[in-house]
């Protein structure tokens, strides 16, 4: 079969619809994962209970030591057996959230470490403690410092959504599979898919560097 | 290697050198010559271009305009387009004959002292391992590092590292040595050991260009001292004149700032 | 939910066969991807436009797209040109290409971390760019790049699971097949997960041990080396 670029263009409208699902999944998943990741960091630092810390350590080690695909399978195939029937979309977001949250918590851990220790002492001497302390002083700084690796993590999430096609979530890759299984032109269709993913990830990381540069100037 | 002892009038010529970094003019149409066996010290306030001029000599910092001629052959000429492979090879060959010593030593930390002195001999001069090692040992003994042959550079003092750097350059049988503030990064008590090695080199007739703040040393060993400011050579003459009877006010100001009671009267 | 422990015993050998293929594929991807990553890194730093543009494009493309799409493209494009390779080879090449883009950035970071004066002294003594790289710069990047390279390798191990989508009979695919037979996803995928996780931890721990050893060696070990040095000294002087 000769390569015909028209197949790429013809597929584009449906692909873009799939891309919007991809974005939805990625944004939702990332939002939840940052929330969960932040919670983990707070639990580690405020409560500091050995049992919880142990569970968190195992959880992080498991996530970082196993393929995302296996994590997706575990959630999608195993949860129904325990009685919890979530559906592909929810299961997918859950898997992505759990996966990304582990990495986010490690990123924030690093960011936290680089927030000057003096901040803790200064706040204590001023009598600020508890939630105000974390919410107004420490966390904002932690996040600002962690922006580059967090942006990188978001692109990882974007790329990971493609794996949800395996559990039938109708995001970009799944849509393209539907298209080329009908027209038998996988290369042209995949090329379009490929370019859309590239555009998304590239745009995210480039705009992040621009933002970072802009902020540096503002703060400096 | 050294050409058959032919004494051309100027051994190393830098002609019409103009170098800019962005909008800053680092060297403003500078002409500079060194005769064979001459020792010239470059002095001047920071930013005056003396280091840049030194690095022009071996084309490490190519100028925008001008040329460098070593013993009758052109080392580099600007402006020129991208140099091809043969030209690059010729430049590397020239550089191996021009030993350069840096303020920050730049010894290679992943090789021990002996290997530092041997490596370029093997890779650039393509000598045999036996010859290279023999020569390296001899030179290391000459600079006083005979008991540090297998030492890692990290375990050497600043003075020892600089002497190692000098040995590394000497192993290539250079015809001219270019030294960029060789003692400026050293603790005061380590300066003398390096200056002693350099002094011996000058006694042996090595052609040297030394950028330095050590005016006492310059007075002792230099045949000529050149004072630079703002990318130009302001005064150039014998140490007696330059350092004790400066002609220009700018040089006088510079010497006053350096508090020139540092060197011994003749 | 009850756990059927007999599944573990009965199907572990089968999974181990797939596991072994996973290991071979990752090793192959390293063998191909590391050297090519070096080429890309040097190309990225080239003074000539074409190599620099080509290397940068390759790196950006492979880093900004999902691996699963790269795999599919490799899988579907080759037959286009009449080339039919076994899926494992296609998978290994795809994994190597993916890995090389990340390796390249790690190596480039290492090269940039070496102080500028090192390159200058190498060039000033007459070394060509490549001689300077080979003798002076690249050796100094090794301790710097070893940890991130290890991380990247572990990442490749995890990404290799995606090769199951093009019928490569590696560990994940083996797990899928067992699950298709037994309909016990928990037991099967937990086994698979533990196998990946165990290999991951082993490699990570080994690298941490290596790092500690490398940092210790420079200072200590003096006595043995001193004897060796004294002997060499005699032959030279």
Image (cartoon, coloured by chain):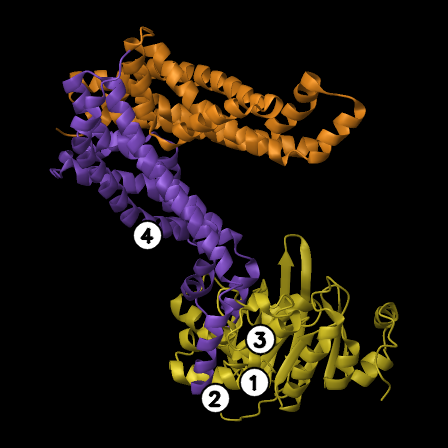
Chain colours: A orange, B yellow, C purple
Is mark 3 in CB contact (under 8 Å) with mark 1?
A: no
Q: Which residue in the structure is indicated by mark 2?
A: C237
Q: Residue at x 69, y 32 (%)?
A: A219
For marks 4 and 1, give the CA distance: 41 Å
* Quarter of the rendering containing residue B17: bottom right
C65 above or below B210? Answer: above
Does residue C75 appear left or right of residue B4 in this picture? left
For marks 2 and 1, give the CA distance: 10 Å
| Badge 3 element | helix
Is mark 4 in CB contact (under 8 Å) with mark 3?
A: no
User: Tag 1 or tag 3, which sits nearer the N-term?
Assistant: 1
* Quarter of the rendering containing residue B60: bottom right
Horizontal and vertical percent position of residue C162? 27, 30
Q: Which residue in the structure is indicated by mark 3?
A: B164
Q: Residue at x 60, y 71 (%)?
A: B161
For marks 4 and 2, give the CA distance: 41 Å
Q: Residue at x 71, y 74 (%)?
A: B190
- Chain of the residue under label 1: B
Q: Are marks 4 and 2 on the same chain?
A: yes
Horizontal and vertical percent position of residue B24? 68, 55
- Chain of the residue under label 4: C
Label 3: how many Cα within 10 Å (few below 14, some 14–19, many 20+): many
- Chain of the residue under label 3: B
* Residue toward you, B225 or A123: A123
Q: Which residue in the structure is indicated by mark 4?
A: C35
């Amino acid at each position: 079969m000769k390569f015909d670029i028209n197949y790429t263009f013809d597929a584009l409208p449906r692909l873009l619809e799939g891309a919007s699902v991809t974005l939805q999944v990625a944004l939702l998943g990332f939002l939840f994962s940052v929330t969960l990741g932040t919670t983990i960091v707070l639990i580690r630092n405020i409560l500091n209970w050995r049992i919880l810390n142990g569970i968190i350590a195992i959880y992080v080690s498991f996530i970082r030591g196993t393929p995302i695909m296996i994590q997706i399978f575990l959630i999608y195939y195993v949860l129904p057996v325990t009685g919890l029937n979530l559906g592909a979309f929810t299961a997918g977001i859950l898997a992505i959230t759990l996966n990304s949250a582990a990495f986010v918590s490690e990123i924030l851990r690093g960011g936290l470490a680089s927030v000057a220790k003096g901040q803790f002492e200064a706040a204590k001497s001023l009598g600020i403690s508890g939630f105000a302390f974390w919410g107004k002083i420490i966390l904002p700084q932690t996040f600002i410092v962690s922006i580059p690796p967090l942006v990188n993590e978001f692109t990882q999430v974007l790329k990971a959504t493609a794996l949800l096609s395996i559990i039938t979530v109708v995001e970009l890759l799944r849509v393209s599979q539907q298209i080329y299984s009908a027209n038998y032109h996988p290369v042209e269709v995949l090329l379009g898919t490929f370019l859309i993913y590239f555009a998304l990830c590239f745009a995210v990381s480039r705009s992040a560097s621009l933002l970072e540069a802009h902020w540096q100037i503002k703060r400096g | 290697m050294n050409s058959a002892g032919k004494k051309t009038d100027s051994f190393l010529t830098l002609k019409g050198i103009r170098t800019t970094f962005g909008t800053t003019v680092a060297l403003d149409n500078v002409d500079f010559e060194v005769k064979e066996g001459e020792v010239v010290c470059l002095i001047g306030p920071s930013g005056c271009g003396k280091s840049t001029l030194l690095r022009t000599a071996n084309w490490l910092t190519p100028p925008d305009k001008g040329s460098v001629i070593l013993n009758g052959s052109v080392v580099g000429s600007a402006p020129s387009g991208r140099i091809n492979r043969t030209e690059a090879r010729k430049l590397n060959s020239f550089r191996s004959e021009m030993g350069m010593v840096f303020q920050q030593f730049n010894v290679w930390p992943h090789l021990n002292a002996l290997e530092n002195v041997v490596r370029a001999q093997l890779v650039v001069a393509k000598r045999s391992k036996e010859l290279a090692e023999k020569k390296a040992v001899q030179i290391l003994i000459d600079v006083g590092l005979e008991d540090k042959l297998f030492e890692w550079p990290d375990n050497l003092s600043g003075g020892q590292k600089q002497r190692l750097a000098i040995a590394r350059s000497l192993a290539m049988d250079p015809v001219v040595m270019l030294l960029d503030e060789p003692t400026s990064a050293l603790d005061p008590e380590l300066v003398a050991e390096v200056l002693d090695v350099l002094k011996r080199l000058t006694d042996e007739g090595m052609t040297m260009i030394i950028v330095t703040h050590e005016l006492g040393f310059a007075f002792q060993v230099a045949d000529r001292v050149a004072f630079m400011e703002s990318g130009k050579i302001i005064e150039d003459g014998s140490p007696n004149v330059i350092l004790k009877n400066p002609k220009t006010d700018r040089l006088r100001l510079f010497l006053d700032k350096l508090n020139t009671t540092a060197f011994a009267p003749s | 939910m009850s756990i059927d422990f007999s599944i573990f015993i009965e199907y572990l050998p089968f999974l181990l066969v797939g596991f072994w293929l996973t290991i071979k594929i990752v090793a192959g991807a390293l063998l191909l991807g590391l050297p090519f990553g070096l080429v890309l890194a040097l190309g990225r730093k080239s003074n000539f436009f074409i190599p620099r543009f080509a290397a940068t494009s390759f790196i950006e493309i492979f880093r900004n797209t999902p691996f699963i799409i790269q795999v599919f493209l490799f899988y579907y494009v080759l037959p286009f040109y009449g080339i039919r390779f076994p899926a494992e080879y296609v998978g290994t090449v795809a994994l190597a290409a993916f890995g090389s883009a990340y390796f390249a950035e790690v190596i480039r970071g290492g090269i940039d971390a070496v102080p500028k004066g090192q390159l200058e002294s190498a060039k000033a003594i007459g070394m060509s760019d490549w001689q300077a790289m080979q003798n002076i710069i690249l050796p100094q990047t090794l301790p710097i790049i070893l940890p991130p390279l290890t991380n990247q390798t572990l990442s490749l191990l995890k990404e290799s699971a995606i090769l199951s989508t093009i019928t490569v009979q590696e560990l994940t695919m083996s797990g899928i097949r067992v699950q298709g037979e037994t309909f016990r996803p928990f037991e099967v995928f937990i086994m698979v997960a533990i196998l990946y996780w165990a290999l991951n931890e082993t490699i990570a721990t080994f690298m941490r041990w290596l790092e500690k050893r490398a940092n210790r060696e420079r200072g200590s070990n003096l006595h043995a080396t001193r004897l060796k040095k004294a002997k060499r000294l005699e032959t030279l002087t």
